[in-house]
Amino acid sequence: MAPTEAVKRLVVLVSGSGTNLQALLDAIAAEGPERFGARIVAVGADRHSATGLDRARAAGLPTFVCRVKDHPTREQWDAALAEATAAYQPDLVVSAGFMKIVGKEFLARFGGRFINTHPALLPSFPGAHGVRDALAYGAKVTGCTVHFVDDGVDTGPIIAQGVVDVVEEDTAEGEAALHERIKDVERRLLVDVVRQLARHGYRIQGRKVLLPA
Ligand code: GRF
């Protein structure tokens, strides 16, 4: 994505509570879309129950829901998701706790401008249980990774990472407590990454994401 003066258009995809979405909404509201470099133009979800949709409505944003079970095949769901997203003409699509792997059609349209946030230090602990898996493995540090999405599971080029220590209390209290501490770092990281990409542009060279200084 090349740096331009124009405010970039973001579509954010969610499945759950949407606190990462809220962090983006809050930062854009506080800084103003011009200074931030982007604004959210729509929020999509794979389920009606995603609380992130309520956050979007509260911010006056259009929403859409695209459920796998409403489509005869996974490919048709993927094409429908791509179509619904494309309707808002995004410059960048952000998967913020969107718990679905997109398919070929979605990547054909949005590859290279589709980012995801994952609650572990990739390439360690990819998949749906990154927090639980790091804890079970006995890792002493974990964290979060914002990366471009490719056709693997959490395998795309890494944009930025944040480190979180695993402490004794995490081992006792488990996944939820550690995940909350990761999300604290993750929300700030995602906001910083989206601002940076929107304002200054980027290039992807193989596995490397090149960000202007
Ligand atoms: C985040 O930790 C994200 O990395 C993971 O799910 C969580 C979503 O949190 N995939 P929220 O819905 O943004 O609060």
Image (cartoon, grey):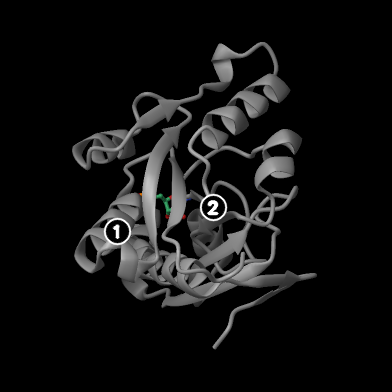
Mark number for residue 23? Answer: 1
Which amino acid, by three-letter code, is at mark 1?
Answer: Ala
Image x and y of residue 118, in percent: 52, 58
Q: Nearer the viewer, residue 83 or 55?
A: 83
| Label 2: how many Cα within 10 Å (few below 14, some 14–19, many 20+) | some
- Asked which quadrant contains residue 180, the reply is bottom left
Position in image of residue 142 (x %, y %): 50, 71
Report the disc number at residue 68.
none
- Residue under numbered circle 2: 91
Q: Nearer the viewer, residue 136 or 90?
A: 90
Specify whether 11 is left or right of 159.
left
Residue 113: x and y in percent read 61, 55
Q: Residue furthest front?
A: 5
Amino acid type at circle 2 is Asp
Q: Residue at x 53, y 60 (%)?
A: 136
Residue drawn at point x = 63 percent, y = 23 percent: 77
Mark 1 Cβ inside 8 Å of ligand 1: yes
State the SS at label 1.
helix
Q: Nearer the viewer, residue 125 or 162?
A: 162
| The image quarter in which residue 68 lies | top right
Q: Residue at x 32, y 34 (%)?
A: 53
Q: CA distance from mark 1 to mark 2?
A: 19 Å
Quarter of the image with the C terminus in it: bottom right
Left or right of 18, for residue 32: left
